[in-house]
Amino acid sequence: MTPAGRLAAAIEILDAIGQTGRPGDQVASQYFKGRRYIGSKDRQWIAQAVWRVLRRKARLDWLLASVGADPIDARSRVLADLVVEGGEIPAVEMFQGPHAATPPDAQDRRVMEMLHKQSLFHRDMPAWVKSEFPEWLLPRLQQVFKDDLAREMGAMREEAPLDLRVNTLKATRSRAIDALAVQGIPAIPTPHSPLGLRLAKRVALVQVEAWRSGLVEVQDEGSQLVALLVDAKPGMAVVDYCSGAGGKTLALAADMENSGRLIACDVAEWRVDRASDRLRRAGVHNVTRRVIGGESDKWIKRNAALFDRVLVDAPCSGSGTWRRNPDAKWSFTPKDLEEITASQSVILKSAARLTKPGGRLIYATCSVLEEENEAQIGKFLAANPDFALVPVGDVWAHRADTPCPVSTPMLRLSPYAHGTDGFFCAVMEKAATPNGP
């Protein structure tokens, strides 16, 4: 593929993301699937160019606006990024050939010349532009991160590492490290999760035997810690209430040693079905997958107060995963936050019905926003006095031999402080008797 073709492809993908509003990874995946002729090195260059622009969107837009660029779109952002990243105005060859992007006109060249050798961190940029997040979230993020706001959001700008969880049904961490090393893939233990491995660079896992044989599974270290705090044990009855593609379900099954009853629920049948290959590869056979019709589903009423552990990995803003999905932040609105928090309250209330006396309800999100996290737990506990908060440090003490990453009663993880995605988790225990403490 020619350099001109690569450049045109990056612009096409970015343009499709902007026009459709679909997640960037889905758009890119569909684009490449429809063009099998694009080789791996070309895909890598195109993907890096696309995600680099997505991670720099606010700064690129600010720089383009500062020199009077019009319009500011996928093409202008890519051209600006080439100038800022490479320090050189693209050669004419970058725009030649049958599938090349439209060559720069006089206006484009004026803009590129003005941006030549500009810094991505101009002193006049507002804080939200430098840190790459929507301006309306500034007071909310300041409330959460306080003096660490710039550092935390700076870490959120960067690319996330590739974390793996060792599947204890098939391997130990040392065996998994050795299996990866056979294929020349160095891996180091994650600092917090006793089952985590972090790779030095991204690899195509479909070509990795340790993944193909189910020794390891992709899972951010923060997500691993949430599953660990569920404290699922062999023989228990456990429900993963919003199981999605099944990442935490797999971790719970391993903790349960394939013993007991584990129900993976979701409202979307396609998400439940998507977990089947992962369960089979991991050697998991104690999971029953169930599609539920929301909080009024009859299955919930029939199974009320029957589960030792109920995990609610609630639908959320995904603000903790912006380093993986940098495009998602720009389509997120105040109305979305209002609707999501309302839905979370309903889901949490519904899932709580499944918790047996003496059992535990675990609420988690991949959000950094207080409205979705501490505020939700505060409202729930106020309305449900039969539930009490269990400090995560108390659970951690018998689940890991590393220090608990937080000193607070609820788990809050973030990229700068912990090197993970942004995660929140609260563990609540239901009174053993109606009048119990």
Image: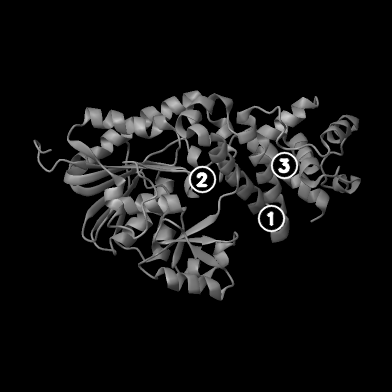
**What residue is drawn where x is 48% and y is 27%?**
140
User: Which quadrant holds residue 327?
Assistant: top right
Q: Which residue is mark 1?
A: 44
Q: Position of residue 379 (x, y in %)?
A: 29, 28
Disc 2 to disc 3, how far (Cα)?
31 Å
Report the quarter where the N terminus lies: bottom right
Q: Which residue is mark 3?
A: 12
Q: Nearer the viewer, mark 1 or mark 2?
A: 2
Q: Judge by depth and name the residue closer to the eye, 141 or 319.
A: 141
Q: Alpha-carbon neighbours of circle 1 within 10 Å: few (<14), some, or many (≥20)?
A: few
* Element assignment for label 3: helix
Between discs 1 and 3, the one toward the N terminus: 3
- Residue at the front extreme of this rendering: 147
Q: Position of residue 44 (x, y in %)?
A: 69, 55
The disc labelled 3 sits on which kind of residue?
Glu
The disc labelled 2 sits on which kind of residue?
Pro
Disc 1 to disc 3, how far (Cα)?
15 Å
The answer to whether the residues at label 2 and label 3 have Cβ atoms under 8 Å apart is no
Can see residue 239? Answer: no
Between discs 1 and 2, the one toward the N terminus: 1
Q: Name the mark on residue 415.
A: 2
Report the quarter where the C terminus lies: top left
**What residue is drawn where x is 70% and y is 36%?**
121
Disc 1 to disc 2, how far (Cα)?
24 Å
Q: Alpha-carbon neighbours of circle 2 within 10 Å: few (<14), some, or many (≥20)?
A: many
The disc labelled 1 sits on which kind of residue?
Gln
**What residue is drawn where x is 23% and y is 59%?**
260
User: Which quadrant holds residue 340?
Assistant: top left
Residue 128 versus residue 406 in the image, above or below: above
Q: How many numbered discs, if any?
A: 3
